[in-house]
Amino acid sequence: MLTQQENDELTQVGPGTPMGDVLRHYWYPVAFVRELEVFPVKEVRLLGENWAVFRTPSGEYGIVDERCPHRGASLTYGIVEDAGLRCGYHGWLFNTSGECVEILAEPDSSPKFRAGCGVRAGSAQALGGMVWVYVGEGPAPELPRYEAYVMNGYRDIGHSMLPCNWLQIMENAVDPYHVESLHGNYFEFIARRQGTPMPESFVANKHEKVAFDPFDHGIIKRRLLEGQSEDSDDWKIGHPLVFPYKMWVGGNGVYQMQIRVPVDDTHTWALFYTVHAPDGLEFGDDLPVVDYEYQWIDDHGRHIVDYIEGQDVMAWVTQGPVADRVNERITKSDVGILACRRMFKEAMQAVRRGEDPVAVVREPHDVIKLPLERSKFGRGAGFAIDWINDGSMRYSPIAEEMKQLHIDAAAARADLGGS
């Protein structure tokens, strides 16, 4: 367990906090590209601060403090122009660097005066169907081009705003034993009570051992299930927590980056960024990106727990807005959680020394490929179907198409003598 001060340091994300300083070293998705094509400016909240993100007619992206420095009106109600974002109240115009380049009522204002009238700005780019922003100090690092965002395949992004701190979600990423209980025993209990079938891919996943290996982008989680050999993908390869707010998971033609954007201390934008790219089929590089909101609470205010990610959300949210780590009872099976907290504490120490924390990318690159098991739990193509039927992807408008895609791919592989 932690002291209250230690818990606060790990969970508070606002400006000037130890963790807030760490988190401002990274890029975050804050909108879908299609949103700014429909309307070119959007209010976003990130790391406890309010921002206006926008897209100019030429396709350049920008992010600035929501408040106009003139009289404090919201720039999310501004006018997007070729030169940037103009405040709707009095017409002050700011470029993507936050510089005030024009004052409507004072066209003869001097550059020296306008230099003191700028608005705080970050950097913004589009990648993989999403708009990403960096709001930290100093030169922005490279936006990491992780495989999920650049690989060919069908993109299917489920998202919801959750009323809890981001860290309790991230700790779940290094807690393999919950798969055995929450997605196994509990799922079976709910299925039996509802009279629905239990997905085969989540039956009898008993752990023999687990391991957690720090690497350049976070922590690789490995598990060995009963009946598996140490040559199995789950043990030999595993999958990573991608520091500080993602997890790369998948298998059997489904690739998923789970993204947990720290909105503020008590809210997280939780996304399941999925790419369907099963072996046996060819995919172009211009396929549409589909996004949708997955449901996690019913009309009576009860958690929806008859699907995998709904069970996860229940466990995250019911811990409270910020998990109470002062009164928890940690055991030896929580070794992954301790490794996660250790990495965050080391990141805070690195930032205090003026160094980059882990997984900050400074070198230009085409793609970053992370370890990922290709055969999940030793299951075959049926794993993909189970995940679509009994995961957040069941809310996708293309769920039926994606199931057929995996069926077709399995048939193509069988024709070629594959599995």
Image (spheres, rainbow, N blue to C red):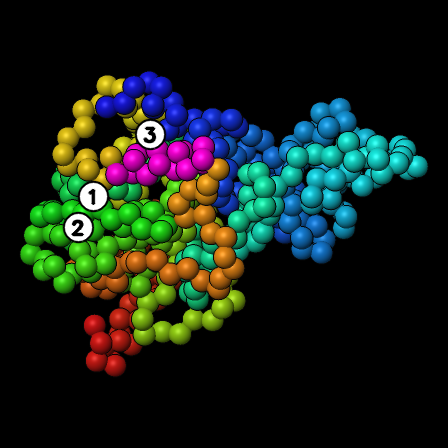
Say which label, 2 or 1, has the lower sequence index: 1
The amino acid type of the residue labelled 3 equals: Val
Q: Position of residue 254 (x, y in %)?
A: 32, 59
Above/below status of 269 relative to 155: above
Image quadrant in which the N terminus is located:
top left
Residue at the far bottom in the pictured view: 416
Residue at horizontal 13 percent and vertical 52 percent from the top: 224
Q: Position of residue 79 (x, y in %)?
A: 75, 41
Q: Which residue is mark 3?
A: 317
**What secondary structure characterizes most of the magenta part?**
helix
In the image, taking residue 264 as reference, residue 378 lies left or right, namely left
- Cα gap from disc 1 to disc 3, whole angstroms: 18 Å
Magenta stretch?
339-353
Characterize the local packing of mark 2: few (<14), some (14-19) or many (20 or more) Cα atoms within 10 angstroms: many
User: Quick check: marks 2 and 1 in contact, CB under 8 Å?
Assistant: yes
The amino acid type of the residue labelled 1 equals: Pro
The residue mark sitting in front, 1 or 3, is 1
